[in-house]
């Protein structure tokens, strides 16, 4: 019993570290306190620009200067495009955007202006827009672990309504420069004097699928990670309390299965809407669902092994990104 308790506690701690370390590394990609020097990479001075974290969910940082309206947008590298749009009213329609992408080896970098005529990919037109971009000022560079898109605008007033988006992971535009639908977006208001940004989304949520993400994670954690384990413990160590242990075990396990199954279904819905590749995470979820359906006989020699496998897999999927 003591060995099992130590195994479970160690598993929780280990996979908690696995889930926390990537988030910590991800948050260190860039910051306004860092001494950014892109001389030789960007055709204008970037050391004296106003700086602010404009999109916390995607770690977008914007640096601006009023000398020819210089802009430097940094974001963690995810092998996808990044975009900043200048909107008349904070919406996507009628905006002009600067979109950039590059590879980790520095090859194939591209920054282009797009006109956002609507919300569908066919209405996002490359090489169109109302922005007057200074010749040879636009560039995008990769400096691990971030990429920096820089450009200058020769206009009187770029407007305070700025919108940002990020493309699907591991997808870059083809030779026709057509974009696929973004996986996340946000609308903000930018103060050029103070260099600070405020969220302009009417719903105050930078991630349109944040509720679905939270519901998926919470249901899976409660069902497979908590209730299922409690049911196993009751069946293993409280059998002297007849018939309380049996009815409690059945009710808890049934509730855990229904809640966990609901979480798995939400996971499939979320994957479909985000259009992302989460094959490893999905495989672990399916394994848990299969193990949750297994009901070895009460005297089966492998009954304890099945229970331990369920617990170990439940713990691992919670820590796996």
Image: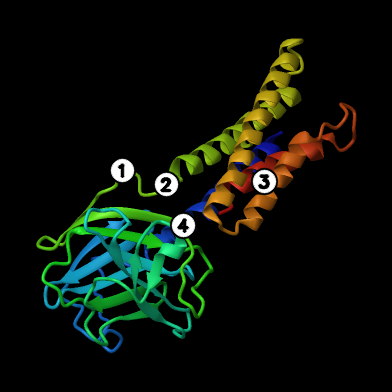
Q: Determine the residue located farthest toward the top in the rendered image.
A: 243
Query: Considering depth in this image, is 26 or 181 the residue closer to the camera?
Result: 181
Cα separation, mark 4 vs mark 2, equals: 9 Å
Q: Residue at x 9, y 62 (%)?
A: 193
Q: Closer to us: mark 3 or mark 1?
A: 1
Instruction: Please indicate whether residue 239 sits to the left or right of residue 62 in the image.
Output: right
Cα separation, mark 3 vs mark 1, equals: 31 Å
Let me know if residue 229 appears in the view. yes
Instruction: Please indicate whether residue 217 sits to the left or right of residue 37 in the image.
Output: right
To which quarter of the image does residue 318 belong? top right
Of the numbered discs 4 and 1, the one sitting upstream in the chain is: 4
Residue annotated with mark 3: 285
Of the numbered discs 3 and 2, the one sitting upstream in the chain is: 2
Residue 216 position in % (x across, y down):
55, 40
Residue 232 position in % (x across, y down):
71, 29
Cα separation, mark 4 vs mark 1, equals: 17 Å
Of helix, strand and loop, which one carries label 1? loop
Query: Considering depth in this image, is 34 or 237 the residue closer to the camera?
Result: 34
């Amino acid at each position: 019993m003591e060995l099992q308790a130590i195994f479970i506690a160690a598993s929780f701690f280990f996979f908690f570290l696995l889930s926390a370390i990537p988030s910590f590394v991800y948050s260190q990609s860039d910051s306004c306190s860092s001494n950014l020097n892109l001389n030789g990479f960007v055709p204008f001075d970037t050391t004296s620009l106003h700086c602010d974290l404009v999109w916390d969910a995607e770690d977008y940082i914007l640096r601006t200067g009023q000398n020819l309206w210089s802009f430097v947008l940094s974001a963690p590298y995810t092998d996808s495009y990044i975009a900043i749009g200048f909107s008349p009213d904070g919406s996507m329609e009628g905006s002009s955007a600067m979109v950039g992408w590059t590879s980790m080896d520095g090859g194939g970098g591209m920054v282009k202006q797009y006109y956002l005529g609507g919300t569908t990919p066919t209405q996002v037109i490359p090489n169109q827009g109302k922005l007057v971009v200074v010749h040879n000022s636009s560039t995008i560079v990769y400096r691990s672990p971030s990429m920096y898109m820089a450009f200058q605008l020769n206009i009187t007033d770029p407007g305070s309504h700025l919108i940002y988006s990020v493309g699907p992971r591991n997808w870059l535009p083809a030779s026709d420069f057509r974009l696929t639908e973004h996986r996340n977006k946000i609308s903000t208001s930018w103060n050029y004097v103070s260099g600070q940004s405020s969220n302009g989304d009417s719903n105050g949520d930078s991630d349109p699928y944040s509720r679905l993400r939270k519901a998926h994670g919470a249901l899976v954690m409660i069902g497979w990670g908590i209730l299922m384990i409690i049911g196993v413990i009751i069946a293993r160590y409280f059998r002297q309390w007849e018939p309380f242990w049996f009815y409690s075990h059945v009710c808890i396990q049934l509730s855990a299965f229904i809640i966990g199954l609901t979480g798995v279904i939400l996971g499939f819905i979320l994957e479909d809407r985000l259009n992302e590749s989460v094959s490893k995470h999905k495989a672990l979820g399916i394994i848990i669902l299969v193990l949750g359906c297994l009901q070895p006989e009460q005297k089966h020699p492998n009954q304890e092994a099945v229970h331990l496998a369920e617990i170990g897999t439940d713990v691992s999927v919670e820590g796996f990104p």
